[in-house]
Image: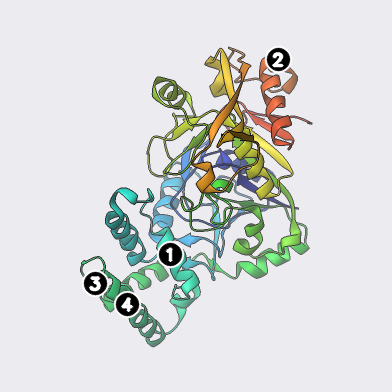
């Protein structure tokens, strides 16, 4: 059984908790795309963790955690993150890294910083983790795969020289910054080799075997549908595919093997970074929701930046679920909304005087105004409730209203940040 856990929206939906929870019954958990530019927060008996590269199954001793070939691998951040997790009392997890994964290089981070600086007010709001330059190099066929660290020195130095011919030309003539030396990059790669050696594996063969043996496999996505390179709010997107369909490519399994797609969405909306966000709210109303949201307020797990917040967007979530090929929805952070007398929900967009429930392309999205329907709040703390029927009537009505609007079953409801604060329901 292969399940994918992915986001319906802009990221920050609470995927880490759902992955951590479902990892209890999984043999393998795989990160299949993205890098250390976004984080998944999990809370369990060991404490609170903001994971950036490690798969969210690392707290389960029986689970094999794989960093797949689709990931942008920063080995120095990986090393630190693993050390931090173990320092908090988690037994050393079983981790494998695909020999086909590609490495974040020092110049990727530099180019990310230099380009944001060059763009000034038109910058993309990058986390400056080197992600866009990394994927640019990957598809330009000048990236470094993990397996190349074990090639002979002449091979590596020759490739480094060819790559630096390109990089230093841009650094010198476009950015007016100091050039990078061949030895600097070679030394970096040798340090990477030292870090990765205990973990590197032919994960393709391992996963193909696991599929044949019907092992329980979780594909863990980063960010959400609206940050996908093709189907997101381009160009304010990430640089890899955030969709479940890419999980087969980024992990190395047959696409037909994915049995279930669990798409995660919050009971309200939140986003980090720039880009269109139709149901966004501002001022005191936003500050209050941001303060109460998440498990420690709505602040990015990687950047610490205050998240933008808004009301639940049925248009964006319906679209995001369709893009993911959703089989069931997990709604998180339901407990956050218990302070509200009334809860607006975005059920449509008004664009040039016409109302639609179809998610538009970005240049039209920028014109969209939210069409809101106001639902009564429940004014109760719903944490600790373990049965769907025990939730307040208005709370159930809220869930079922959204379910009807998006057209996908909400089978999992999270009513608190802890691993066990979850309600399963049959829609």
Residue 173: numbered disc? 3
Residue 168, visible in the rendered structure: yes
Considering the numbered disc 3 on the image, is that residue within a helix, a strand or a loop?
Answer: helix
Q: Residues within 10 Å of mark 1 (few under 14, many from 20)?
A: many
Q: Residue at x 28, y 74 (%)?
A: 168
> In screen coordinates, is 80 left or right of 372?
left
Q: CA–CA distance between discs 1 and 4?
A: 14 Å
Residue 277 location in percent, x, y? 49, 38
Judge left or right: residue 106 versus residue 93.
left
Q: CA distance from mark 1 to mark 2?
A: 49 Å
Check the image and report above or below for 305 versus 235: above
x, y (%) of residue 386?
A: 69, 23
**Numbered tag placed on residue 320 in the rendering:** none
Residue 103 in view (yes/no):
no
Q: Residue at x 59, y 34 (%)?
A: 349
Q: State how far apart marks 1 and 3 are (Cα).
A: 20 Å
Q: Which residue is mark 2?
A: 393
The Cα–Cα distance between marks 4 and 3, rounded to whole angstroms, is: 13 Å
Which of the labelled discs sits on residue 164, or is there none?
4
Q: Which mark is residue 134?
A: 1
Residue sitting at the far front: 353
Query: Residue 191: x, y in percent?
Result: 36, 68
The kind of secondary structure element at disc 4 is helix
């Amino acid at each position: 059984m292969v399940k994918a856990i992915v986001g319906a929206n802009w990221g920050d939906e609470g995927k880490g908790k759902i992955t951590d929870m479902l990892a209890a019954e999984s043999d393998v958990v795989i990160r299949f795309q993205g890098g250390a530019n976004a984080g998944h927060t999990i809370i369990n008996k060991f404490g609170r963790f903001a994971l950036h590269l490690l798969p969210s199954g690392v707290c389960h001793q029986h689970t094999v955690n794989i960093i797949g070939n689709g990931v942008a691998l920063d080995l120095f951040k990986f090393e630190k993150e693993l050390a931090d997790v173990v320092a908090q009392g988690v037994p050393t997890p079983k981790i494998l890294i695909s020999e086909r994964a590609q490495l974040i290089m020092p110049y990727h981070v530099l180019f990310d910083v230099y380009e944001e600086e060059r763009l000034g007010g038109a910058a993309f709001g990058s986390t400056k983790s080197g992600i866009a330059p990394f994927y640019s190099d990957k598809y330009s066929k000048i990236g470094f795969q993990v397996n190349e660290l074990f090639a002979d020195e002449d091979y590596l130095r020759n490739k480094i020289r060819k790559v630096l011919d390109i990089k230093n030309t841009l650094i010198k003539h476009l950015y007016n910054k100091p050039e990078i030396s061949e030895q600097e990059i070679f030394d970096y790669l040798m340090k990477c080799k030292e870090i990765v050696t205990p973990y590197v594996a032919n994960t393709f063969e391992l996963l193909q075997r696991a599929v044949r043996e019907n092992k329980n496999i979780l594909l863990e996505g980063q960010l959400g549908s609206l940050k996908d390179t093709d189907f997101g709010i381009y160009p304010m997107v990430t640089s890899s595919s955030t969709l479940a369909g890419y999980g087969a490519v980024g992990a190395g399994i047959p696409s037909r093997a994915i049995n279930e797609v669990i798409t995660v969405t919050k009971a309200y909306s939140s986003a980090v970074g720039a880009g269109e966000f139709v149901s966004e709210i501002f001022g005191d109303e936003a500050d209050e929701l941001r303060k109460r949201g998440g498990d420690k307020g709505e602040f990015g797990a990687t950047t610490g930046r205050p998240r933008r917040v808004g009301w639940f967007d049925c248009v964006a979530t319906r679209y995001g679920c369709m893009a993911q090929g959703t089989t069931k929805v997990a709604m998180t952070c339901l407990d956050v909304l218990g302070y509200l007398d009334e809860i607006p929900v975005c059920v449509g967009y008004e664009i040039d005087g016409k109302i639609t429930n179809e998610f538009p392309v970005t240049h039209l999205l920028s014109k969209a105004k939210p069409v809101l329907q106001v639902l009564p709040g429940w004014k109760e703390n719903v944490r600790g409730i373990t049965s769907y029927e025990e939730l307040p009537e208005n709370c159930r009505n809220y869930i079922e209203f959204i379910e009807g609007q998006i057209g996908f079953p909400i089978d999992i409801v999270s009513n608190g940040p802890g691993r066990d604060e979850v309600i399963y329901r049959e829609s």
